Amino acid sequence: MTNQSLGVKRVKDKRLPIMKAAMHLFSSKGYFSTSVQEIADYCGVSKGSVYKCFNSKEELLLQVFEYNHQNMMARAKSVRLNESLSPEERFVKMIVVELEGLIENKDFFNAISKSLPKNNQVTLFMRNIRRIMVNWHKSILEDIFGEEVQSNIWDITFMFQGILKEYTHLITQEQKTLSIERLAKAVYDAIEAVVERRKQKDAVISYALMGDYEAISNPFSFDEKETVGNFLKQIKEKIETLNLEVAVREELLDSVELLEKEEQQEKPRMFLIKAILTFLSGFTELEPELENLRLVLLHDTYNERG
């Protein structure tokens, strides 16, 4: 798959009309009911031209997700960097931007949520998108409330997530008309109250428990080797932080090196990859990173490279 990322300013003109056509047709017909030929016809190019830009309909879908996500994030970040706004104003405006992005593309998200292709790449992609958004919301809270949220940051983050999720459901799924500005201000008031109540309490969700959210890969890389390389790097870095005997640490690092060499072979030996992953799984501290790695390595098409 191509290693090209579709940053907001980097989308080539010839790719953007195809993505917009795909988004329209996926929204109106659903993913599985839309063919690549229909996408090509809609934007007036040949089917071959679509495949020159995107290796598959699945990759096209994921890059449409990326384009929408990065547009929203770019607008939200510009608000966050606006020092003329008070902390409350920044919080409210960032929530407004996020909700407006969801509302603007609600037909697409509603259609796709009912018909996402079920495979490991899509599962990994959607999992990492969720984790990116959770970490984004966590960073907003840290930016706005500072030291007040540090001891309970993950608890407050998921409370924030839950509030947004329910309001979003009302707007996008149940088609309720709400004032986004008033909603965002209400969310701020609720979170401010939560912060005040939780700052003297013990955390339910510890930092240690959220290691898998810290170990997110770039969901917008469609290069399998790059993705595997990133996960292996994360595992090696994690091993270096563990309180292990020298011999055990060296054995773990040697296993990761062996896995890295094997996955780079033209025909990786899946029995060996599975054996190494099983060995590494004996160390529960590595499980968050291993879970992501399994999704990439252990699927039917992985050893069909050539």
Image (tube, grey):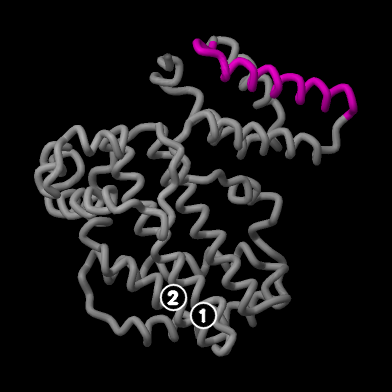
Magenta run includes residue 247: yes
- Farthest right residue? 246
Residue 270 visible here? no
Relative to residue 213, is residue 279 depicted above or below?
Answer: above
Relative to residue 273, is residue 221 depicted above or below?
Answer: below
Q: Confirm or deny contact between disc 1 and disc 2 (CB under 8 A).
A: yes
In the rendering, at what x and y percent does residue 62 appear?
35, 45
For residue 174, what is the image quadrant? bottom left
Q: Mark 1 sits on what residue?
A: 91
Residue 135 visible here? yes
Helix, strand or loop status at disc 2: helix
For residue 86, what is the image quadrant? bottom right
Q: Residues within 10 Å of mark 1 (few under 14, many from 20)?
A: many
The prevailing secondary structure element of the residues shown in magenta is: helix
Say which residue appears at 43% left-offset and 71% top-offset.
75
The label shown at residue 203 is none
In the rendering, at what x and y percent does residue 190 appear?
50, 81
Q: Mark 2 sits on what residue?
A: 95
Total numbered labels: 2
Under mark 2, the amino acid is: Ile
In the figure, is residue 277 to the left or right of 104?
right
For the C terminus, the quadrant is: top left
Q: CA distance from mark 1 to mark 2?
A: 6 Å
Say which residue appears at 65% left-offset and 26% top-offset.
281
In the rendering, at what x and y percent does residue 59 appear?
33, 39
Say which residue appears at 41% left-offset and 60% top-offset.
9
- Highlighted range, magenta: 245-268
For the N terminus, the quadrant is: top left
Magenta run includes residue 226: no
Under mark 1, the amino acid is: Phe
For residue 135, what is the image quadrant? bottom right
